[in-house]
C-alpha cells in the first residue's frame, strides 16, 4: 500500500506541474515576425529532399515552390497584385512567331539567386536542355515533346524553337499552382545524376531561403532574404513576415484547436463544421468571405462524371434524365452544409469566370430548350442560388448576403430544376422502361448505377455522392455509392466506374482561356475501354463538335477574344450533351487568423489572390501581410 | 544439453519458416493491391499543373522504367529476394530514390521510444495495481481503481485520445498536441531537445497507458485472486510471514510468469507501430510512414516495414521459446 500511496503522490505532483510545461510552438523565433501556415501535403517522409525537379521525391508546398522557386509568368486565380497576369522572371508576355513554332522570352534583369549568382538566360537554357536529355524528371516529357532547340542570343533573351505549332507553350512556364521552375545552372551542372541529388540546402530564386526543417517532415521554416529586393517580388515592397513556417497540424479538428490557440495563422482547408466553429468561437478567424459561405471557390469543378464509354451513358437523353433527378439544394446542404457555390455550366464559378461565362451566358441558359421526346422544356432555374440563400437565412441570419450580386458570387446562380416527369420521358425515349417502382434498361436488366466516391479522404464529395444516389434511388434507379478510398486515382484513370464524383474541369481561374484542361479532351487522347486514360478527360467523351472547338482554340492566341467565344461554344455543347453533370466549385475552407497578421486576401476588401497557401501564387500574400503587433 | 540443442534447432527452423512465409505474404499482398505507384505519382504530379496527355503518357513510361516495375512478376520476385537477403529493400517508390531503409531508420527510434515507455508503464502500473487489488480485496480505493481501469479499457482508443486532445490542447492548453518536439529545435543530445521530446510524448504515452493498463490490471488481479487461495500462501500467513512479503515474494512473483510472456509479445509488437496514436497526435514514427506508403502504393516501403515487424515479433517469440526451458522446469521436462 505504501507503493500505492507513492504512486498517487507522484501523479498528483505531475498534474500540478503540467502548466509549467506550456510554451510557444516555435523555439527561438519571434512569434510576431513568424507566419505559421498549414502545408496540406502533411508529413513529408523525405524531408531533406529539395530537388523539386525529381518527380515526387520530396515535398513541394513545404514553402519550397511558394517561396524559393520562380519562373517566367504567373496567372492569378483572382485579381493578382499586378493584375491577373504577372510577368515574373520574364519582363514581358511571351512573343510567338506567326505560326506558333517559336517562342521568345525576354528576361527581367537584376534577379539573383540566394548565393549571389545572377539569374540569366543560361539558367533557362540549362533547365531546358537538362530536361530534354534526362528521362524521368518532372518536366522531361513536355520538353521532349515540344522543344526542338533552345538558344540564348543574350543574357536576357531566350528563344525556344518548337517541334510543332503550340500556341499555349508558355503555359508550361506559367504558374497556376506550379509550373516549370528554373534551375540554378551553377549548382546542377556539377551534379552527376540530377535524379539522385537532394539539393539540400536549396539555393533560392524567391524572396526567402530555407532556415531550418524537421527531419521528420512535420515543419519547414523559411527566412526572408537580406537581398529580397533582388528577387521578382522585390518590386512590390518588403515582405511582411520575416519567417514563414509550413507545418503539418494534423486532422481538421486539430487545425481548429491550433488556430483557436493562435498557433496556426492559416488553415489551408478544414471541414465545413470546423469552419462554422471558428466563425462562431474565434473572433480573429476569417474565411475568404467574411460571412457564410466563408470558403474560397477553387477553379475546379466537382461533377458527376459519367463513363461515357459505358453503353448505358452513351445516350445523352439518359445523362440528361439523371441530371434532372438531382435536387442541387439538397446536394449543397449534404455536401457543404449549404456553403457550396453551384454551377450549371461546365466552368468553375470563380475568379473572372463568373463574369466571362456565368453572367454572360445566363440569358442563353434561360432560353435553352430540351426535347424530352414528348415535349420541349426549359430546364434552367435561374433562382437556385437565391433559393439556397433564403433557405439558410433563418438559421444563419445576417451572415447571408442580401445583395443579388453577392448571393450569386457566394452561392452561385442557377441550376437545373428537378423534373422527374421530364426524366421519365427522356428515359422512355431512350428505351428504358419502368416496372412497378423500378427502372429497367433497354435490354431488360435492372437499371443500376454505381457512384464512385473517395470516402473519408474527401468527405464533402462523398456526402454529395450519397445524396445523389439517394435521389436517383427515390426515382426507382438502383443507385448506390462505391467507396474507392486509396484506389480513387487508379479507378478514375482506368475507367473502372459508372459514374464518379470528381472533376475533369480545372481552369486558370483568372483567365478565360480554357486550354488548361480542354486541350486534353480532344478525342485523339481518349483511350480505348480498359486502357489507362491520361488526365483530364476522365469521362472518356469523344465528340467531333468538341474536337472542332479545341482545334480552333489551338490556332488562336492566348489573349485573343476569339478564345473566349470558343469557350462559350464549349459551354453550350456541354449543356446540350451533358457528358458530365457539373455540380459546384471545389470550395476550400481556408481560415486566416488575424491575431498576428493583417492583409489577408478576402472577397470583399482585397481579392488579390486565392488564399490557399499551397499554391505557388500564394507568394503574393507575403508582400501584402503586415504584422499587427 | 543435446535435447535442448534439438529443441533450439527446431525453434530456429520454425523462426526462419515464419519469416519466409511472412515476407512472401507481404510481397504477394502488396503486389496484388489495385493501387499503382506510378498512377499515384502521375496523379500527384499532374493534379494541379497544366498537363498534356502526350507528356503524361511519356512520364508514365519513364517512371515505370525508373522504378524498376518492368518485367514479369516472377522476375520481380527474384530481384526482390536477391535484395532482401542482403538487407536491401530497394528505393522507396513514393520518395524515390531514397532507400526504404533510410526512411525506416529515421522513423523507428520514435516508435520504439514511445511504445517501449508506454508498454512498460502500462505493464508496471497494471500489474502493480492489479496485484494489490487481488490481494487487498477489501480496499475501497482499489475497488474504485478496478472499476475505472475496466471502464476505460473498452473505450475505443481514438475516443480516449480525442478527449485528451480537447482537454489538454484546448480547455486547459498546457501540453503540445502535435509533433515529436518543438519547432525550430535542432536534434541532438542536449537538455532542451530531450525535454521537448519528453514533453511532446506525454499525451501519446498517457493515452496508450490509459487504454493499455486495464488488460494487465484484470489479468493480474484474477491471477493473484487464484494464488491467494493456494496452500502455500495460507501456510505462510499461518506462519506469521508479513503480508507485504507474502504479496511480493509469494503471490505476485508467481503470478508474473504469464504476464512476463505477455510483455515480451507486446514489446515485439512495438515494431508494428501505433498508427492511430501517431495519426491523432501527429507523432512521428513507423505507423505514419506505413499509412502513407499504403496510400501511395509504395510497396517497397510497405514490405520493408512489414519485414521489420515480422522479424521483430518472430525474434521475441523465439527468445521466449529458447528461454522457457531454462526458466520453467515443466517445459524442460516436456
Image: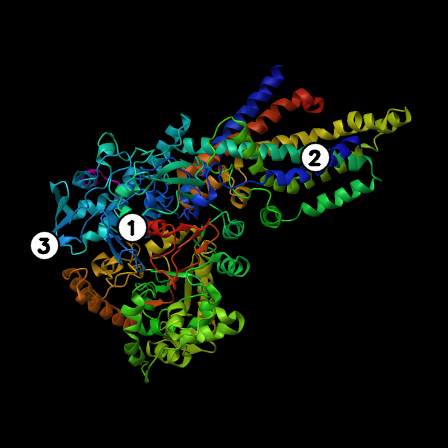
Residue that label 2 marks:
B125
User: Quick check: do tags 3 and 1 share a chain?
Assistant: yes
User: In the image, which is nearer the foreground, mark 3 or mark 1?
Assistant: 1
- Tell me: A377 left or right of A596: left
Question: In the rendered image, which quarter is residue A589 located in?
Answer: bottom left
Q: Is residue A37 visible?
A: yes
Q: Is residue A526 visible?
A: no
> Disc number at residue A97?
3
Mark 3 or mark 1, which has the lower sequence index?
3
User: Quick check: do tags 3 and 2 share a chain?
Assistant: no
User: In the image, which is nearer the foreground, mark 3 or mark 2?
Assistant: 3
Q: Position of residue B202 (x, y in %)?
A: 60, 38
| Distance Cα–Cα, label 2 vs label 1 | 61 Å
What's the coloring here? Answer: rainbow
* Parent chain of label 1: A
Task: Name the quarter where the N terminus of chain A is drawn.
Answer: top right
| Distance Cα–Cα, label 3 vs label 1 | 32 Å
The foreground one among A322 and A175 is: A175
Residue that label 1 marks:
A236
* Parent chain of label 2: B
Q: Position of residue A627 (x, y in %)?
A: 43, 49
* Parent chain of label 3: A
Identify the magenta region: A130-138
| Distance Cα–Cα, label 3 vs label 2 | 79 Å
User: In the image, which is nearer the foreground, mark 2 or mark 1?
Assistant: 1
- Tell me: A151 left or right of A191: left
User: Quick check: do tags 2 and 1 share a chain?
Assistant: no
Amino acid at each position: 500500500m505504501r507503493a500505492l500511496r507513492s504512486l498517487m503522490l507522484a501523479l498528483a505532483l505531475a498534474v500540478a506541474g503540467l502548466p509549467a510545461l506550456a510554451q510557444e510552438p516555435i523555439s527561438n523565433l519571434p512569434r510576431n515576425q513568424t507566419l505559421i501556415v498549414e502545408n496540406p501535403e502533411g508529413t513529408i517522409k523525405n524531408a531533406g529532399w529539395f530537388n523539386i525537379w525529381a518527380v515526387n521525391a520530396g515535398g513541394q508546398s513545404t514553402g519550397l515552390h511558394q517561396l524559393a522557386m520562380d519562373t517566367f509568368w504567373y496567372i492569378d486565380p483572382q485579381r493578382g497584385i499586378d493584375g491577373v497576369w504577372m510577368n515574373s522572371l520574364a519582363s514581358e508576355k511571351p512573343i510567338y512567331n506567326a505560326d506558333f513554332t517559336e517562342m521568345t522570352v525576354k528576361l527581367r534583369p537584376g534577379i539573383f539567386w540566394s548565393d549571389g549568382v545572377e539569374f540569366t538566360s543560361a539558367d533557362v537554357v540549362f533547365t531546358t536542355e537538362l530536361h530534354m536529355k534526362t528521362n524521368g524528371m518532372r518536366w522531361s516529357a513536355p520538353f521532349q515533346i515540344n522543344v526542338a532547340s533552345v538558344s540564348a542570343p543574350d543574357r536576357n533573351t531566350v528563344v525556344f524553337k518548337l517541334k510543332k505549332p503550340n500556341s499555349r507553350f508558355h503555359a508550361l512556364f506559367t504558374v497556376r499552382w506550379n509550373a516549370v521552375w528554373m534551375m540554378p545552372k551553377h549548382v546542377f551542372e556539377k551534379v552527376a545524376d540530377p535524379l539522385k541529388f537532394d539539393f539540400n540546402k536549396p539555393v533560392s530564386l524567391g524572396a526567402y531561403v530555407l532556415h531550418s526543417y524537421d527531419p521528420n517532415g512535420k515543419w519547414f521554416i523559411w527566412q526572408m532574404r537580406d537581398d529580397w529586393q533582388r528577387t521578382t517580388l522585390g518590386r512590390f515592397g518588403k515582405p511582411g513576415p520575416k519567417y514563414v513556417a509550413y507545418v503539418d497540424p494534423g486532422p481538421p479538428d486539430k487545425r481548429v484547436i491550433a488556430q483557436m490557440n493562435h498557433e496556426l495563422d492559416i488553415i489551408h482547408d478544414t471541414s465545413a463544421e470546423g469552419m462554422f466553429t471558428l466563425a462562431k468561437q474565434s473572433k480573429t478567424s476569417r474565411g475568404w468571405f467574411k460571412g457564410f459561405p466563408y470558403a474560397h471557390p477553387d477553379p475546379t469543378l466537382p461533377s458527376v462524371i459519367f463513363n461515357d464509354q459505358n453503353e448505358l451513358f452513351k445516350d445523352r437523353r439518359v445523362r440528361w434524365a439523371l441530371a434532372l433527378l438531382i435536387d442541387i439544394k439538397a446536394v449543397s446542404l449534404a455536401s457543404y452544409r449549404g456553403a457550396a457555390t453551384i454551377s450549371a455550366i461546365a466552368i468553375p464559378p470563380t475568379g473572372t469566370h463568373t463574369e466571362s461565362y456565368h453572367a454572360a451566358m445566363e440569358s442563353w441558359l434561360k432560353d435553352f430548350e430540351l426535347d424530352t421526346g414528348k415535349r420541349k422544356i426549359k430546364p434552367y432555374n435561374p433562382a437556385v442560388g437565391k433559393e439556397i440563400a433564403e433557405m439558410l437565412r433563418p438559421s444563419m441570419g445576417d451572415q447571408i448576403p442580401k445583395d443579388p450580386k453577392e448571393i450569386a458570387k457566394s452561392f452561385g446562380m442557377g441550376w437545373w430544376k428537378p423534373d422527374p416527369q421530364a426524366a421519365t420521358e427522356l428515359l422512355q425515349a431512350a428505351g428504358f422502361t419502368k416496372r412497378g417502382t423500378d427502372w429497367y434498361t433497354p435490354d431488360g436488366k435492372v437499371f443500376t448505377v454505381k457512384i464512385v466516391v473517395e470516402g473519408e479522404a474527401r468527405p464533402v464529395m462523398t456526402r454529395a455522392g450519397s445524396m445523389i444516389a439517394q435521389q436517383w434511388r427515390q426515382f426507382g434507379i438502383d443507385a448506390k455509392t462505391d467507396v474507392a478510398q486509396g484506389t480513387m486515382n487508379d479507378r478514375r484513370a482506368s475507367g473502372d466506374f459508372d459514374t464518379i464524383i470528381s472533376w475533369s474541369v480545372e481552369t486558370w481561374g483568372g483567365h478565360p482561356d480554357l486550354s488548361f484542361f480542354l486541350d486534353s479532351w480532344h478525342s485523339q487522347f481518349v483511350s480505348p475501354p480498359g486502357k489507362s486514360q491520361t488526365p483530364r478527360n476522365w469521362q472518356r467523351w469523344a465528340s467531333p463538335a468538341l474536337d472542332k472547338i479545341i482545334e480552333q482554340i489551338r490556332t488562336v492566341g492566348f489573349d485573343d477574344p476569339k478564345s473566349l467565344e470558343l469557350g462559350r461554344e464549349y459551354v453550350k455543347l456541354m449543356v446540350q450533351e451533358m457528358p458530365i453533370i457539373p455540380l459546384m466549385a471545389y470550395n476550400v475552407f481556408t481560415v486566416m487568423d488575424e491575431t498576428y497578421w493583417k492583409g489577408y486576401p478576402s472577397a470583399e476588401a482585397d481579392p488579390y489572390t486565392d488564399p490557399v497557401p499551397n499554391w505557388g501564387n500564394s507568394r503574393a500574400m507575403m508582400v501584402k501581410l503586415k504584422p499587427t503587433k | 544439453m543435446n535435447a535442448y540443442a534439438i529443441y533450439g534447432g527446431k525453434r530456429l527452423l520454425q523462426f526462419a519458416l515464419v519469416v519466409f512465409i511472412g515476407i512472401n505474404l507481404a510481397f504477394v499482398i502488396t503486389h496484388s493491391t489495385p493501387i499503382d505507384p506510378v498512377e499515384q505519382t502521375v496523379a500527384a504530379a499532374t493534379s494541379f499543373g497544366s498537363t498534356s496527355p502526350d507528356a503524361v503518357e511519356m512520364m508514365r513510361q519513364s517512371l515505370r522504367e525508373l522504378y524498376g516495375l518492368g518485367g514479369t512478376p516472377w522476375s520481380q520476385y527474384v530481384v526482390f529476394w536477391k535484395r532482401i537477403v542482403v538487407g536491401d529493400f530497394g528505393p522507396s517508390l513514393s520518395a524515390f530514390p531514397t532507400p526504404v531503409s533510410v526512411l525506416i531508420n529515421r522513423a523507428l527510434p520514435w516508435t520504439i521510444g514511445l511504445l517501449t515507455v508506454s508498454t512498460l508503464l502500462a505493464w508496471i502500473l497494471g500489474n502493480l495495481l492489479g496485484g494489490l487489488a487481488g490481494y487487498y480485496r477489501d480496499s475501497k480505493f482499489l475497488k474504485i481503481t478496478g472499476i475505472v481501469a475496466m471502464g476505460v479499457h473498452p473505450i475505443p482508443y481514438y475516443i480516449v485520445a480525442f478527449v485528451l486532445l480537447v482537454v489538454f490542447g484546448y480547455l486547459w492548453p498546457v501540453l503540445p498536441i502535435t509533433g515529436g518536439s518543438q519547432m525550430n529545435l535542432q536534434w541532438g543530445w542536449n537538455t532542451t531537445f530531450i525535454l521537448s521530446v519528453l514533453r511532446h510524448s506525454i499525451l501519446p504515452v498517457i493515452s496508450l497507458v490509459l487504454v493499455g493498463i486495464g488488460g494487465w490490471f484484470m489479468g493480474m488481479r484474477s491471477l493473484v485472486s487464484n494464488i491467494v487461495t493456494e496452500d502455500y500462501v495460507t501456510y505462510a500467513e499461518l506462519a506469521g510471514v508479513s503480508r507485504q512479503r507474502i504479496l511480493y515474494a509469494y503471490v505476485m512473483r508467481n503470478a508474473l510468469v504469464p504476464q512476463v510472456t505477455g510483455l515480451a509479445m507486446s514489446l515485439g509488437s512495438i515494431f508494428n507501430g501505433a498508427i492511430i496514436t501517431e495519426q491523432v497526435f501527429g507523432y512521428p514514427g513507423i505507423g505514419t510512414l506505413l499509412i502513407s506508403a499504403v496510400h501511395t502504393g509504395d510497396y517497397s516501403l510497405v514490405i520493408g516495414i512489414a519485414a521489420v515487424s515480422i522479424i521483430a515479433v518472430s525474434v521475441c517469440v523465439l527468445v521466449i521459446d529458447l528461454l522457457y526451458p531454462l526458466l520453467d522446469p515443466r517445459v524442460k521436462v516436456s
